Image: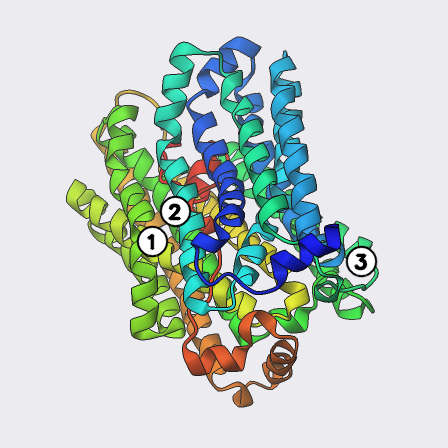
Amino acid sequence: MSSNRSTAIVSRSPRSLREAWVALAGLSAVFLFEMLDNSILNVALPTIGRDLHASTTALQWVTGAYAVVFGGLMLAFGAIADRFGRRRIMLAGLALLGVASLATAFVTTSEQLIAVRAAMGVAAAMTTPGSMALAFRMFDDDDLRVRATTLISTVGLVGLAVGPTAGGFILSIAPWQVLLLVNAPVAVLAIVGLRTGIAPDDPADLHRDPADIPGAALGTATIVFALVAPTLFVNEGAGSWIPWAITAAAVVAAVLFVVRERTARHPLLDLKLVAHPLVSSGLAFKAASGLATAGLGYLVTLQLQLDWGWTPGLASLGMLPQVIVLVAGGALITPLMRRVGLERAAWLSAATVVLGLAVFGLLGRLGYVWVALALVLVAAGMRVVGVVAGTNVLRGLPENRTTIGAALIDTAGEVTAGTGIAVAGTLLAAMFTGPIAAPDWSAHQTGQFRDAVTIASLALTAMAAALVGWGIARSRHAANPAGDAGGAGDAGDAGDAGGAGGAGDADGANAANTARDADGATASADDAAARGAGQPA
């Protein structure tokens, strides 16, 4: 009976979004969990601290544990899903999410809550890459792919936007545990959608290479160290040896990971595929977006509240232009890509992100209108980059590597977002004398802060511009693969494997393929800023 059901589901690809509404509801629920989980929890941190008698460090890890585990395990679970089945791994992750959410009701200490949040991070790592890969592969038509991915990301971004307001309302009538218990029904909705709307994994779409355990361990260590280091630079300061030691550990782990992947017979991540121009350019654009969005969110939040004296509530309203564009901007993605083509849309949107950050750095201190303009530009560019960057990555990969490709996209955004926070925080700490949260600044301190914000934002602009420039150079190789000795063979491999529509076919048709916009949010109270949520830290 199960085989007949499977055949019925996969006999043809859906010809409209309506035909795939059950599956889309399930995948949207997965993204809703990822977006809602962080934004809704941040408003409860003071209440959690009082209820559990948690220290400042413990509260940081209530959100940070989720971000570090999520970012650290995405690559490994992406590879596992391509080996054992995307649908299977997603269902297991959703089951874990439901159990972890229910466990919140029994939490009595901050350590227990941190453990629950870490378990939720594991669940997110198991579900997020697969949601992108399944959404990409569900449709044969490129236009439907874009519309489906835009729909899924919009649902998540709506959750992100209403999360703080909904969280505040819930806290006024119920205990804070309810904020995490809400994940249980979301997990149930996603499980129902996946089980009834998406066929079981086809063994022909999976690879059978042995698991690269050393590669997975080194890759996870690299990402975890890279995510922890920025927080330590902000909290401990650049004068402490601890963040430098963690940074060195990240570099060593990264070098060992590259050596392992180059020499392993069955590597976790085929570096030749990453070198493919479509893949490397997409990752560069995604990285630039993560860096700029996180840095801007961090700096704007501090400027509005510390320099201009806005209340947290008013500062939240000040971030609304970004949230509105993130939610409403999805309607512009498909027309833009139809008009200018996928490659041009990719670099134009990435350049828009850089332009927005530059506007803030040069003019943001002159008044809120310039801050709002910067928020709009960055959000508009990020909204498009989230789709087209992921599309380029998946176009350059074989079908049996699409989930690890999706994990690469999210990981690139996570790591560079943390880097953006670290660069901004370190420069502020170096240039500002005295406690930055003190209520009354001297005129000298105000000048120090404004200069630090300007220098930090321009430094981030230069870093993001370098990534975009490199991505543009790589995308030109994708348009002319014969000129790229390292990528030509991979392009052929991707085309032979049917890699997400085939690089050659997509180039000829200016295919508007898809990928989830994951930059709409994530990573601690640093999390919300670091993933571009636009919520005050």
- Of mark 2 and mark 1, the one earlier in the sequence is 2
Q: Position of residue 16 (x, y in %)?
A: 43, 59
- Count neighbours of disc 3 (C-alpha within 10 A) and say few if under 14, some if 14 to 19, many if 20 or more: some
C-beta proximity under 8 Å, tags 2 and 1: yes
Q: Position of residue 507 (x, y in %)?
A: 46, 80
At mark 3, the secondary structure is loop
Query: 258 or 139, which lies in front?
Result: 139
**The residue positioned farthest toward the bottom in the image shown:** 482
At mark 1, the secondary structure is helix
At mark 2, the secondary structure is helix
- Residue found at x 70% / y 63%: 269
Q: CA distance from mark 3 to mark 2?
A: 35 Å
Q: CA distance from mark 1 to mark 3?
A: 38 Å
C-beta proximity under 8 Å, tags 3 and 2: no
**Amino acid under disc 2:** Thr
For residue 403, say whether it is visible. no
- Of mark 3 and mark 2, the one earlier in the sequence is 2
- Residue found at x 59% / y 80%: 491
- Count neighbours of disc 1 (C-alpha within 10 A) and say few if under 14, some if 14 to 19, many if 20 or more: many
**Amino acid under disc 1:** Gly
Which residue is the site of mark 1?
330
Classify residue 182 as left or right of residue 170.
Answer: right
- Residue found at x 61% / y 74%: 498
**Amino acid under disc 3:** Asp
Q: Nearer the viewer, mark 1 or mark 3?
A: 1
Which residue is the site of mark 2?
154
Which residue is the site of mark 3?
212
Q: CA distance from mark 2 to mark 1?
A: 7 Å
